[in-house]
Amino acid sequence: MPHIHLLPPRLANQIAAGEVVERPASVVKELIENALDAGASRVDVDIEQGGVKLIRVRDDGCGIAAEDLSLALSRHATSKITSLDDLEAVTSLGFRGEALASISSVSRLSLTSRTENQEAASKVEVEGRDMDAHVSPAAHPVGSTVEVRDLFFNTPARRKFLRTEKTEFGHVEECVRRQALSCFDTGFNLRHNQRAVQSLRPALSELDKERRIASLCGQQFIDNAVVISAEATGLKLWGWVALPTFSRSQTDLQYFFVNGRVIRDRLVAHAVRQAYRDVLYNNRHAAFVLYLEVDPGSVDVNVHPTKHEVRFRDGRLVHDFLFRTLHKALADVRPDDHLRGAVAQSLGRENAFAAVTGSAEGLPSPGSAASESALGYPGGIERTPGQVTHSDPQHQWQASDQLGFYQALNAGGGVSAGRQASVAAHPPQMLEDSEQEPPLGYAIAQLHGIYILAQSRTGLIMVDMHAAHERITYERMKQALAQQDLKSQPLLVPLSLAVSQKEAGLVETHGDELQQLGLVIERIGPETLAVRQIPALLRGADGEQLVRDVLSDLIEHGQSDRVQAVTQELLGTMACHGSVRANRQLTIPEMNSLLRDMEATERSGQCNHGRPTWTVMTLAELDKLFLRGR
């Protein structure tokens, strides 16, 4: 048997590099994190040939003293932690002291740095071949510059796994994007093959932050995003979450940061999916940029070499906080939030709120020539007195006058001819102040018995009446169920299940929680369970599969929402069958009452299946179709 021996330093560093340095983007990530830890206000990144030929990262941070330069390239050498207590409450992005040593073992690396107290800078150079550091004087301002050339020149097997230059630079660009989103106080510049790709100034104000988000994630994202900020039990969550209508086919627009560190975590992903569960269309993904601030001592960042994963001390508390915050933010979304995004895309974000609400400073009064110009009308257009405009109160019905009609609609009956004649003979009162116009405006017609057409100062609003009524009915059924709680129904013959000992033990430790879900389960053997009661609402469901899914969730997440998910799916089906159908002719009062209910209903922008319930075409977009004002 071979004798045990110590590995040579070069080989040990190359093994560590296999964990830390996967591709050029990994090098960029480590170097930018060092720059941010040094307090840099500006970071410049230069890339050549996708990072294989050259990676240069320059910052204006505190720098490294000349006597520490050689030590900085040694393994496990760092200035960020000194004891176990520091490791258990890490506040810096880096802390292991492995990055520079690992990078220098597979490249030709030079580090030039100067501190504020030094008159001249120093430069240290090292090659992966012999790992000998050579220090020499150099010219450099306060801060540091790291140059990494010929990455993987001495490990050809690793170099063969690299992709094309375009692909590798795409990963580098994504890395810089994440770091720029994590630190708004720092400016970033990215160049590839001497060509400027990204230039970001420090974002200090809220408007500057939104502009940075727009430049990195797209203007459409910020136009369709809701700002959230919540704090509870030592946790703070803030950032931007996109409206469900702005969903993605993949998870390419999901950024989550914990104390400024970008992470990918299953617990976070599960909480987000649960919050978006009944508002996203099939196989679509939410978009968000979220920042979680927690006590550094309550999160373990020393989990993975790349530091992309963390482990929370109380994962269930974090999961519940994320879910409740996002769930409430999505529930509070109303039609005017959707309208703001639609108008922003045609008028510009700065004027969006003013155009929708008409309440911002300096906004022209509705109906004026200046107002029409702001909404897309060329100035000076004359309108005849009988012409219907976006501020015409002709169809502004009082809600009290419409309630009786809508009650008949919910009951499944129609409005009698006598009642319609009464409406024609006694027109409803009109709102005197057009500023009180609701977000979805007022109905003017029904199209093919499927869509409701409404007008507002924003433009033309089109509503899928079945989808809208379906969401309204669904939310009412959920509220009614929540007030009554889940009732259990005993099984005539208990259901026997063969499970693992771990699953059987979960039933004993989580018995009370299972009972709150309407499940009464007993352990009758080391690996046998007896299901005695299930939720009465789910008596037709597959009881065995339901219980197994619940136990699986308990093992993975410490809790389960499986019963709630199945219950809501059933309620959604019931709401779908109980909602107004296509080709049902509605009166104007019924249409307006439906619009008012949508404005008061949570998540009314999507039906139970995640499809949109309404859309808007602004006056500016309509004018563009007809070349008005050109």
Image: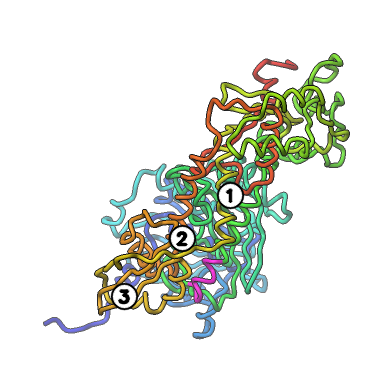
Q: Which residue is mark 2?
A: 264
Q: Nearer the viewer, residue 456 or 542?
A: 542
Q: Secondary structure at mark 3?
A: helix
Q: Are marks 1 and 3 in contact (CB under 8 Å)?
A: no
Residue at 63% in and 49% down: 602
Q: Looking at the picture, tell me which residue is in the foreground, 212 or 76.
A: 212
Kind of residue sitting beneath label 1: Glu
Question: Where's the N terminus, which quadrant?
Answer: bottom left
- Number of the front mark, 2 or 1: 1
Please report contact status of discs 3 and 2: CB closer than 8 Å, yes or no.
Answer: no
Q: Residues within 10 Å of mark 1 (few under 14, many from 20)?
A: many
**What is the residue that sits farthest to the left in this orientation?**
1
Q: Nearer the viewer, mark 3 or mark 2?
A: 3
Q: Vertical placement of 595 versus 265: above or below?
A: above
Question: At which x and y percent is residue 114?
Answer: 60, 68
The residue under label 3 is 504
Q: Is residue 33 visible?
A: yes
Q: Main secondary structure of the magenta part?
A: helix
Q: Is residue 37 toward the left or the right of residue 337 in the image?
A: left
Q: Is residue 420 magenta?
A: no
- Which label belongs to residue 475? 1
Q: Which residues are magenta?
A: 312-320
Q: Residues within 10 Å of mark 3 (few under 14, many from 20)?
A: many
Amino acid beneath label 3: Ala
